[in-house]
Image (cartoon, rainbow, N blue to C red):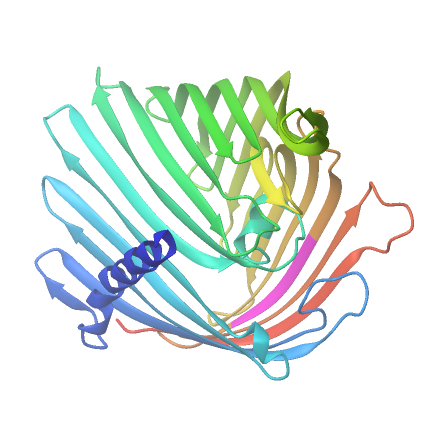
Amino acid sequence: MLEMRRERVFNVLICFFLLPALFSSPWEVSAGEMTVVPSIDITAGYDDNVYYTRTEKESDYTTTVKPGFELNYKSELYTLRSRGYVDLIRYLDNSNLDRENYYGLLDGDVSLTERMRLKGKFSFLNDTTLDSQLDETGIVTTRTDRKRYDGGGELTYRVTERSNAGISYNRQAVRYGSELYNDYDYDYVGLIYGHSFNNGLDQLTVNPYYGDWRSDISSVDNYGLSLGILHTFSETLTLEGSVGLRYTDTERSYKRGEIIFDPDTGTFRVVEKEEKKKDSDWGGTANIQLKKTWIRSSLTAGYSHELTYSSSDGNAEPVNVDRIFCSVEHKITSRFRAGLAGSFYITKSESEFGDRDTRYISLTPSLDYEIARNYSLRLAYSYSRETDRTLDDSPDYERNRVWLTFSARFL
């Protein structure tokens, strides 16, 4: 019954997000400050390890059709934004992997008073653990269906011309389609204070927060304080960074069998009892990002050290993720450009209850050609590899992919 209700909610949400695109014409539709822009991506690709396994790798050809839309509405008092797409994925040989991914986003903000503003956001994502979850944690896991619901809001008050304060809350629910994973919920609440100086070129932020992960086998309470700064060196160079301190409490539940004597039957029997263990730890957080643009080129590079939650292989635990990333793009001609994106992850268990220790690297060179305004082609290649440092004799996970994408936005 619960699963049927979830499916009904899912169908309603998809209709809500996609109806604006379905009933709009294939051009930009304007009514005052509202615009609706449909789009479509068509991709043909090759994957030499579709299951992303260490042994018995299987290759296949894929075709993906991705219709989507963007909706924006703006008035003097409020703004509304919506995004959505459906990913129709088909495999030539492994038809059991055929699926549809769904994504929908709705967010907006409204001016309650001259100084007070309220923001809200809701999003839904239905994909697999080999898609966005791999990008979030750098962990290669067994492929299964995943649904992620996100919703929250932020209330801010402009204290002075240069300062603002507020409070934010977000709730995330993640549901899996396999018993190998543990469903979990995440609640976040934080306070916000921001102050700009140096004629608005610099901004300082202070963010105390609390996060709470909950699953059937573990719970994590995370208390933190983050200090951030945004500095604008010039119109073409910006630096954004933050550092913080956190304290984390983790509680893990275990089930064990215990032999007891039953006086009514005069026999011994095994009963299952639950046992809980706790662990706590201090740690740090960091996030830094540099952006630079030239006349024909651009660069984005950064580093992050964050605590997140991972669920796979019957385990659910907090993990520390270190990520180094870089993206470079160069315009060769007015219509032709080349790019290179790369990421490197170090993922380790945060508590004593886990022993995860992995390395993950991903490199993606690409070529883009603008056929005409709002129509383009992209040829890309991706190499990725994960190393599990807890295993001595197993080879790495490796995957090579290449694809060609035609993109169109109907403006």
- Residue 261 on the magenta segment: no
In the displayed orientation, state which residue is furthest to the bottom.
92
Q: Which residues are magenta?
A: 362-368
The answer to whether any part of residue 1 appears in the image is: yes
Residue 34 x %, y %: 14, 58
The quadrant the C terminus occupies is bottom left
Picture residue at 71% right of the left edge, 69% below the top: 49
Q: Quadrant of the N terminus?
A: bottom left
* Main SS of residues in magenta: strand
Pick the residue in front: 209 or 288: 209
Q: How many badges with numbers are in the image?
A: 0
Q: What is the quadrant of residue 136 in the picture?
A: top right
Does residue 374 show up?
Answer: no
Who is closer to the viewer here, 183 or 16? 183
| x and y, in percent, of residue 316 in the image | 60, 38
Relative vertical location of residue 280 with respect to residue 231 in this rendering, above or below: above
Q: In percent of the image, x 64 and y 72: which residue is there?
A: 402
Toward the right, the furthest residue is: 393
Residue 379: give x, y in percent of width and height. 58, 73
Task: List x then y, in percent, for residue 269.
Answer: 70, 33
- Quarter of the view holding residue 190: top left
Q: Is residue 364 magenta?
A: yes
Residue at (49% x, 18% y) in the render: 223
Relative side of 4 to 358, left or right: left
**In this rendering, would 133 be left or right of 50?**
left
The answer to whether residue 140 is above or below residue 242 is: below
Q: Is residue 331 left or right of residue 34?
A: right
Residue at image coords 20%, 48%: 80
Residue placed most toward the observer, 158 or 130: 130
Along the viewing direction, whichever of 149 and 123 lies nearer the viewer: 149
